[in-house]
Image: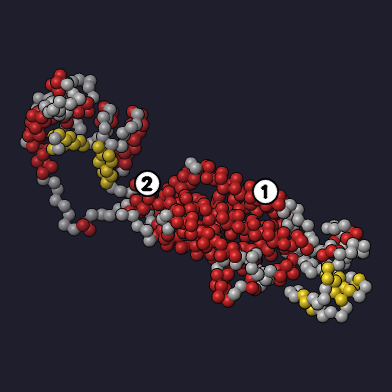
Amino acid sequence: MELITNPKLIFLDEPTSGLDSFAAKTVMDSLRTLAFMGRTIICSIHQPSAEIYRMFDQLVLLGEGQTVYFGSIEQCIPYFSTVGLHCPPYRNPADFLMQILYVAPTEDGDHNEELALKNTSNDQVKTMIKSFKKTEFHQRALNPPEPPSKISDFKKDKTANSFTQFGLLFTRSWLGLMREPMQARARFMQAAFLAIFAGLIYLRLGYDQTSIQDRFSAIFFIMVSTAFGGINAPTYLFPAERSVYLRERASGMYTPHIYFLARSLSELPINVIVPVLTGVVSWWLIGWSNDIPNFIYFLIIVTLCTNVAVSLGLSMSCWIHDVALVVRVQPMILLPFMLFSGFFLNVDSVRPYFLWLEKISFFKYSMSAATKACFAKQTFCCDFREQFRILENSTTFLDNTTMLLNNFTMVLNNSLSIADQSCNKYFNKTTLVPNGTMYGNQTLICPILDGEQVLQVYSFAKSTIFIDCMILLGMLLFFQFLAYLGLALKRGK
């Protein structure tokens, strides 16, 4: 990652430590390739092999904190020969140099007296230091080329372009996700379990009056379950990368918007596949309808609801560093949104001082759009026991939205058997009564006959699926921007 900004000077501290000979050789080959491309690479090296030793162009040897040699690799061994230190034939020059630079302990320690005598004493190292100060290498080091008069005289090389930075960051983020397969598996298992669980609870719902509330409850359960799974996804993943991001940004490796875009797009596939899986399984098990356009609408709505929750969770993680605090704040935001979703409280019943909260609840728009998709083109019937009994002298006002019924009671007599041909496929013929049937001096009325009336009852008929989806998309982009803002304002030290 340090190479993203295309640096001209690279410092490395023992890059081969802990590696076997082959891996160390591979690392040094890569560094030498970078050096041939115009970069200056300075590194300390730990016990290099003869092959790695010969890769270096310049060598600095230190003894007692002072320079013993500073020059080319080719002239190093001949130089020490001139001061009476000869490297034996067929010996690794690096091992020879480490031996002559070794300073024996001055006090009793782990080395015995015999080993100490075999190594160079302090006086010998001091002699090498004095000898080096008399050489042309030392004079050259004392008289470096004059620096430019102005900093601007240095040619500033361009860093890697935005496409390169995005490609590297996207690849790293994607590989990071692939290296943690349990995270993805857990989300898939959670989505599949909740979808199957909801499908089994609301398995093949009928079309009587009772099924209307069951269908509405099923929509709410699916939206809430996917939203909770989405908001928790970035809560633990992003904080683990925050320290890396801050350090790399402080080094000028990339800009915040490139990192944010790469990070978000790398997680997009799983944030789409998981809600689609939930929508497909639940739609088939519950048996909403066979209408393909509404099925596609439903998948889009579930996906938007999930990704709005993901964006909300990401924005909280970017602004709040404490994961425990994020977990505590999430219910404070989600629960009011759920309360004003239209499930617990009718949209038209919201108090004026809470209208702003109802307007920003993404659950409300998810429920509104999903209800339209699931109840569209649906026809509902009444069992004989579910119809209202209206007296002839009662005042009745019926339209698509309101039903004022006076002096009505529930008819519980199953002896009447009049078949309504439009509902034969849903109910037993012996329990059906057509809407408006006269029973003595009473008229039998079925409260809700189609999906449009359902939308009127729940006050969701004021907008369209397209408008609700556009509002959800706007919320998604807003929370993404809020997350980016929190990321961009955080700077590493």
> x, y percentage for residue 10?
28, 44
Name the quadrant of the C terminus. bottom left
Give me the C-alpha separation between circle 2 and circle 1. Answer: 43 Å
Q: Is residue 137 visible?
A: yes
User: Which one is in front, 81 or 429?
Assistant: 429
Q: Position of residue 325 (x, y in %)?
A: 45, 56
SS for callout 2 = loop
Q: Earlier in the sequence, mark 2 or mark 1?
A: 2
- As drawn, 18 above or below 446: above
How is the protein colored in the picture?
Answer: secondary structure
Q: Amino acid at mark 2?
A: Met
Relative depth, front residue between 341 and 72: 341
- Residue 64, percent from left and from top: 13, 35
The residue positioned 42% from the left and 58% from the top of the image is: 320
Q: Residue 321: image x %, image y %?
A: 41, 55
> Which residue: 52% across, 62% down?
333
Report the amino acid beneath label 1. Ile
Which label was assigned to residue 12? none
Q: Residue under circle 1?
A: 196
Kindly identify which residue carries mark 2. 1
Dividing the picture into quadrants, the one containing residue 382 is bottom right
Residue 88 quadrant: top left
Q: Is residue 418 left or right of residue 182?
A: right
Q: Is residue 420 visible?
A: no
Side (left or right) of 408 relative to 319: right
User: Which residue is at 10% across, 44% downward?
Assistant: 142
Q: Residue at x 77, y 75 (%)?
A: 403
Camera-near label (2 vs 1) is 1
Packing grade of label 1 (10 A; few <14, some 14-19, many >=20) is some
Figure check: 260 above or below 350 = above
